[in-house]
Amino acid sequence: MSALLTLAIVVYSIICVLLILLIIIQGGKAEGLFSNAQSNVLGSQRGNALSKATTFLSTIFIVGALLISVAISTQKTAFESVPTNTTNNNTQQQTAPLAAPTNNTNTQATSNQ
């Protein structure tokens, strides 16, 4: 795996964690995780800022998933890098057919009599 792809997966993982945290913090019917503490600190701008951040991170999440999947699918695997010229080798190496085994015990028994 290339270093750039590894870096992209690490950044993508951080975005996933941030997106989860933003969704947990947001207010909904139950007013989110920190309903009383944040309403005093952030005021009425809380819902607008968090919803914009969630939209932004979810867009990056979807685009990042598509880009990482394309990057992984375009990499060569170990099986694709092995040459497949086995048909030429099989035609060059021809073996002689095996001879049928002879029954030496019968010939010795008849010659002894």
Image: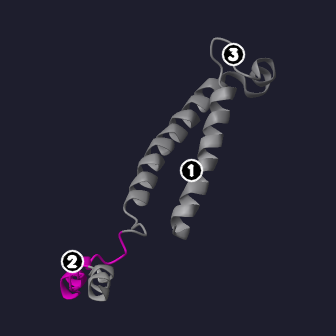
Q: Please report whichever mark, 3 or 2, sits nearer to the chain's N-terminal start.
A: 3
Residue 54, how many percent across, how many down?
56, 34
In screen coordinates, is 112 left or right of 40? left
Q: Residues within 10 Å of mark 1 (few under 14, many from 20)?
A: some
The residue at which mark 3 appears reads as 31
User: Which element is circle 1 on?
Assistant: helix
The residue under label 3 is which amino acid type? Glu
User: Which residue in the protein does label 2 denote?
Assistant: 87
Q: Which residue was labeled with disc 1? A: 12
Residue plotted at (36% across, 76% down): 82
Q: Which residues are magenta?
A: 80-100
State the residue lying farthest toward the right: 37
N-term-proximal mark, 1 vs 3: 1
Instruction: Place residue 97 in its image quadrant.
Output: bottom left
Which is more foreground, mark 2 or mark 1?
A: 2
Q: Nearer the viewer, mark 3 or mark 2?
A: 2
